[in-house]
Image: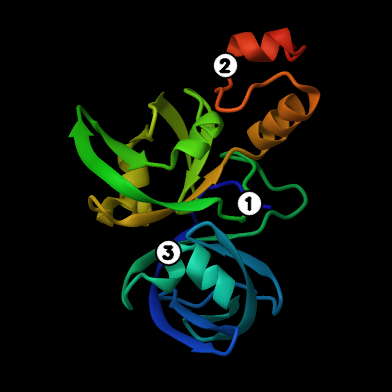
Amino acid sequence: MFTGIIQKVAKIADRKLSGKAGKLVVDLGSPLKNPIKGESIAVNGACLTLEECSENLLIFHVLEETLKKTNLGSLPKGSKVNIERALSVGDSIGGHIVSGHIDATCPVRSLRKKGGDWVLSVEYPQEFAPYFVEKGSVSIDGVSLTVVEAGKDFFSAHLIPTTIETTSLSDRKPGDLVNIETDLIGKYILRYLKASGGLKAGSKINMDVLRDSGWDH
């Protein structure tokens, strides 16, 4: 599990695919402290297994499916990626619970400055509408953010200067694909509501729906 608090921005150094699997090589720019072969590391929010570590380079085993379902298969070499190591017992959960399983890659609509912050807007397929709730959590390229606006086919999140400075999101342009993981707890609630008949197809979750279903604590 992860929290969406980025620990390092790295660059894609190489990507090799052989059959149904391959290797993704990431350049950290400095050695990783106490690397453990087989440990889980989120790269742009996608949970990968560390296969080898050599000086500044991290080498991950990746499936063809991972490269197809995330932007790790399409980003050019040299692209910046966000790095987060998995939670250890006793670590602080500074963002929100992130599984590292990407739900979709979605195009950036805009990244614009507003006052002292930035507003990042991302488009999504209509079937994902129920998963985006204002003031809910979302992971964009592994970064824990809060949804400030949830439209019919897009959502927006505010980026504070620290987020712009310490993640790869500052490089995103309209049309760029970003990895999206919707809120894990929200997904379980939505599944429960659908199974219990408390949510009609195409409906969005809101506080009234949650209260009517007993989620008022």
Task: Answer few, some or many: residues within 10 Å of disc 1's Cα (few below 14, many 20 plus, some between 14 and 19).
Answer: many
- Callout 3, which amino acid? Asn
State the residue in front, 161 or 81: 81
The picture places residue 178, in percent across and down from the top left corner, at 40, 54
Rounded to the nearest angstrom, the CA distance separating label 1 from label 2 is: 26 Å
Q: Residues within 10 Å of mark 2 (few under 14, many from 20)?
A: few
Lower position in the chain sequence, tag 1 or tag 2: 1
Q: Secondary structure at mark 1?
A: loop
Distance of mark 3 from mark 2, alpha carbons? 30 Å
Residue drawn at (31%, 76%) of the image: 78
Callout 3 touching callout 1 (CB < 8 Å): no
- Which label lies toward us, 1 or 2? 2
Q: Would you say the residues marked 3 and 2 are in contact, meaning their CB atoms lie under 8 Å apart? A: no
| Residue under numbered circle 1 | 2
Residue drawn at x 61%, y 55% is 100
Q: Which numbered marker is on residue 170?
A: none
Q: Could you give the CA–CA distance between mark 3 and mark 1, rounded to whole angstroms?
A: 19 Å
Residue closest to the far bottom: 18
Q: Judge whether 63 appears above or below 52 on screen.
A: above
Q: Which residue is mark 2?
A: 206
Q: For residue 13, what is the image quadrant?
A: bottom left
Q: Earlier in the sequence, mark 3 or mark 2?
A: 3
Secondary structure of the residue carrying numbered label 3: helix
Instruction: Give x and y (percent) for residue 140.
Output: 45, 47
Residue at the disc numbered 3:
71
Depth check, front residue: 49 or 93: 49
Residue type at mark 1 is Phe
Q: Regarding mark 2 in the picture, which secondary structure is present there? A: loop
